[in-house]
Amino acid sequence: MTEDDLVRRAVKLVRENRYLTLATCGGGMPWAAPINYVIGPGSHLHFYSTPTARHSRHIAATRSVAAAIFDSTAVGDDVDGMQFVGECAEVTGPELAAVCEHYFATNFPDPQVREWWYRPPTEFEGDGTWRFYRLEFTEIHLIDVESFEETKVDARVEVPLARFLDALRA
């Protein structure tokens, strides 16, 4: 499998799925949370959560996270997935409004549905109930399908990060 193939697979997984499993750790206690995300602005993933959620408290203490994206409905040869390491932080300041608008427009393209889900940027700062978080990729791995076909051993292959980020922006 070429680097181009790896990049295409990774971008496809991120674009065609809406949820990831986010792994955090704080105080020696690991945690995994299902997270609904959107791509962008840029080549980052954004999601929101309450600052009191366990994963949010972990992120406040340490930005390092890991995650997995996969199609849980796939079977047999259609199974694919990625695992990645990243840096995650709360979105603050002047970029908050743009991230908020992008998130709701992307996640809820139907205006009527979006109206029900929409929360203004002020709900994501100060005394607001939620916070937006930016997840930046730092390392990406895919299932090594060629190795699996030969050995039946489930292994991973690293995806070239810079090429993946460029392709995700496109």
Image (cartoon, helix red, strand yellow):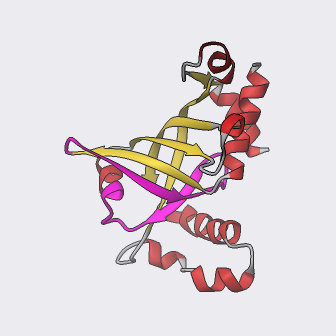
Corner quadrant of residue 63 = top left
Quadrant of the snapshot with the N terminus: top right
Q: Is residue 76 left or right of residue 117?
A: right
Q: In this view of the protein, which residue sits in the foreground, 40 or 66? A: 66
Whether 97 is drawn above or below 143: the answer is below
Residue 145's spot in the image, x, y percent?
67, 24
Q: Is residue 94 left or right of residue 101?
A: left
Whether 113 is drawn above or below 27: the answer is below
Whether 143 is drawn above or below 124: the answer is above
Residue 125's spot in the image, x, y percent?
42, 71
- Residue 29 magenta: yes
- Residue 131 magenta: no
Q: How many labels does the image show?
A: 0
Q: Give the range drawn in magenta.
A: 27-56
Q: Which residue is pictured at 74% across the width and 78% down the height?
A: 110
Q: In this view, does 22 lie to the left or right of 160?
A: left
Residue 170's spot in the image, x, y percent?
80, 44
Q: Which residue is pictured at 48% across the width and 64% down the height?
A: 48
Q: Which residue is pictured at 71% across the width and 27% down the height?
A: 6
Q: Which residue is pictured at 76% across the width and 34% down the height?
A: 8
Residue 155's spot in the image, x, y percent?
55, 21
Whether 80 is drawn above or below 4: the answer is below
